[in-house]
Amino acid sequence: MTIVEMLDSHPEPSNVRRELLGRAVDSMLNCAALCASCADACLAEENPAELRDCIQSDLACADICATTAKVIARQTAPNWKIVKAQVQACLVACQECGGECEKHADHHEHCRICAEACHSCEMSCQELLDALPASTWASRT
């Protein structure tokens, strides 16, 4: 089963296109896993202290992406102000982490891979934010 199938089966779906939500959830969960893996790989490098900022941004981004995926997957009477704030936080975390990983991408393949995942997730977040009408954010329904 996929997240889109689950969203399609919901008896009270939100007014957001399920395909768009599904792509965003998949992108966020992928980014969360890759950021966690990148942090782990950074810790295994010869001098992990040099990668401290990268590790911190990886771990923050992983947590924020995973949490955002859970929040946007919930369809029953979402609080759109919270949803919007969470997706915006995810977008910022992905921008920051992607930028930090890019600094190390020439020397560490795991950072290059992570930066790509972050930028992909950032685009998914922006697409989701752009797809929601401004009035959606004004109320709970």
Image (cartoon, helix red, strand yellow):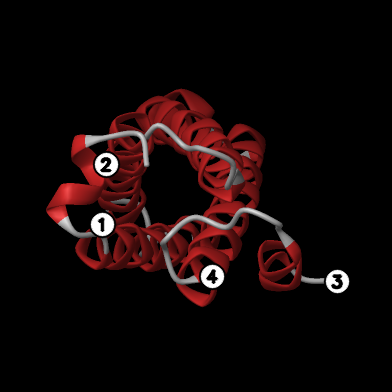
Residue found at x 30% / y 57%: 102
The earlier-in-sequence mark between 2 and 3 is: 3
Is the residue under label 2 in contact with that under label 1 (CB below 8 Å)? yes
Which numbered circle lies on residue 88?
A: 2
The earlier-in-sequence mark between 3 and 4 is: 3
The location of residue 87, given as percent across then percent down, is 35, 44
Q: CA distance from mark 1 to mark 2?
A: 8 Å
Indicate the amino acid at tag 4. Arg
The earlier-in-sequence mark between 1 and 2 is: 2
Q: Residue furthest right?
A: 1
Q: In the depicted view, which residue is nearer to us: 25 or 103?
A: 25
The earlier-in-sequence mark between 4 and 1 is: 4
Dot 4 falls on a residue whose secondary structure is: helix
Q: In the depicted view, which residue is nearer to us: 22 or 79?
A: 79
Q: CA distance from mark 2 to mark 4?
A: 19 Å
Badge 4 density bin: few <14, some 14–19, many ≥20, Cα 10 Å: some
Q: CA distance from mark 4 to mark 1?
A: 14 Å
Q: CA distance from mark 1 to mark 3?
A: 26 Å
Residue under label 4, please give it: 18
Residue found at x 65% / y 50%: 33
The location of residue 22, given as percent across then percent down, is 57, 67
Position of 91 with respect to 37 (left or right) is: left
Q: In the depicted view, which residue is nearer to us: 58 or 22?
A: 22
The earlier-in-sequence mark between 1 and 3 is: 3
Indicate the amino acid at tag 1. Leu
Which numbered circle lies on residue 1?
A: 3
Indicate the amino acid at tag 3. Met
Q: CA distance from mark 2 to mark 3?
A: 28 Å
Residue under label 1, please give it: 129
Residue found at x 20% / y 64%: 130
Dot 2 falls on a residue whose secondary structure is: helix
Q: Residue furthest bottom?
A: 19
